[in-house]
Amino acid sequence: MKNYPKIAHLTSVHSRYDNRILIKQCVSLKNAGYDVNLIVADGKGPQEFEGVTIVDVGANKGLLHRMVFQARAVYKAAKKLNPDVYQIHDPELLPYAYILAKQGKKVIYDIHEDYVTGIGQKEYLPRWVKGVAAKMLDKLEKIFSKNTTLLLAEKYYQERFPEGTLILNYPIVSEKAAGNLAKVHSGFKGKDLIYTGNLTEVRGAYTQTRLLNHIPDIHISFIGFCKMDLARELEKSIGENVDRMRLIGKGEFVPFDQITTKYLERKWVAGLAIFPKTKHYEKKELTKFFEYMTYGLPIICSDFPVWKALVEENQCGIAVDPDNFAEIEKAITTLYEDQTVYEQMCKNGRNAVLNKYNWEVQESKLLQVYSRLLS
């Protein structure tokens, strides 16, 4: 019986159904013939998913427990598997990555986030602590990631890690998504807008919900995890307009297949990404942009230079000042009333994904990385 190279993906933070880790990378590696294991810490038990073995070390009991005890439990579970390649997905696992690399093990560090600027988004930290913590993390991340192979989920991460390989978080193009294009030529049922992904203050929770208080007749559906206390605050903040908002994901993770079902649910005027101005997001090419484009949805997003360049280059959306309600309303009205503009943006976005912004291209690069490591 042939022994296939064994791979272990390690995370103490992410959901077992994380789109980048499980749906894209693990399944791609499994389909390429690898023996793939995903080690998580969520307390939901072991599972098989499309041939990927999921190992669970138990749910965490808070931040400190997760960073100290769960991170070590994930590491120990991986060591027990004794894989040919370890791929870690969280910075708290970096000390173990450093140990493994020192032992001559093949280790990949997959950088999902800009963790340095991300510290600035932690509302519970004093400003002076954020500055010190960001500098410390920057140094520690560079030290502990030495002798590992670096994968980068965003182009601008190369500013800090020029030696990293870009494995961008582009969508998997499916026939299911193509089915949504039939709705492009049908009539609108209303001024329906959609936002997908985690909903937090820095990800536009208030910036987008307040549109309901300023723009009549629009309806917004938010599909993604939202903390219960934030959900209650958002509902309270829009008062009598609450019946024009849907929050799917109050206090619970929303599986990606449920998100795709919502994309197909109706003809949406646009996919939203109207975020307040922050350093952490201004250079990011949000995964949701490419999902919207895949499903034939025009984008209405904040006019950050990188975001504006993306939608204008591909002619698939409208960038707006997140604080200018008149400008946002005009963008919505244009897409709702001008069918020619709407259909062209839908088509442009879909074609851009088919031609360049798709997982198939990134999958090929991922497999090349593994082939080089194991050769």
Image (cartoon, rainbow, N blue to C red):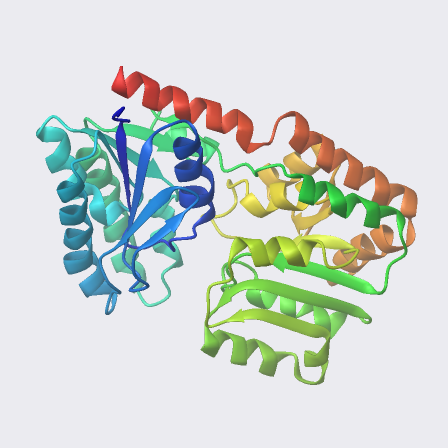
Vertical placement of 42 versus 83: above or below?
Answer: below
Residue 360 in the image: x percent, y percent?
54, 28
Give residue 187's quadrant in the image.
bottom right
Identify the residue at image location x=59%, y=56%: 259
Residue sticking out furthest to the left: 103
Vertical placement of 75 versus 189: above or below?
Answer: above
Residue 368 in the image: x percent, y percent?
39, 19
Residue 275 visible here: no
Give residue 108's quadrant in the image.
top left
Vertical placement of 241 versus 322: above or below?
Answer: below
Judge from the rendering whether residue 220 lies leftward or rightward of residue 374; answer left or right: right
Q: Nearer the viewer, residue 58 or 125?
A: 58
Residue sticking out furthest to the front: 1
Q: Indicate the quadrant containing the C terminus: top left, top right, bottom left or bottom right.
A: top left
Residue 35 in the image: x percent, y percent?
31, 34
Identify the residue at image location x=84%, y=65%: 190
Residue 348 visible here: yes
Judge from the rendering whether residue 371 lies leftward or rightward of residue 146; answer left or right: right
Identify the residue at image location x=75%, y=45%: 179
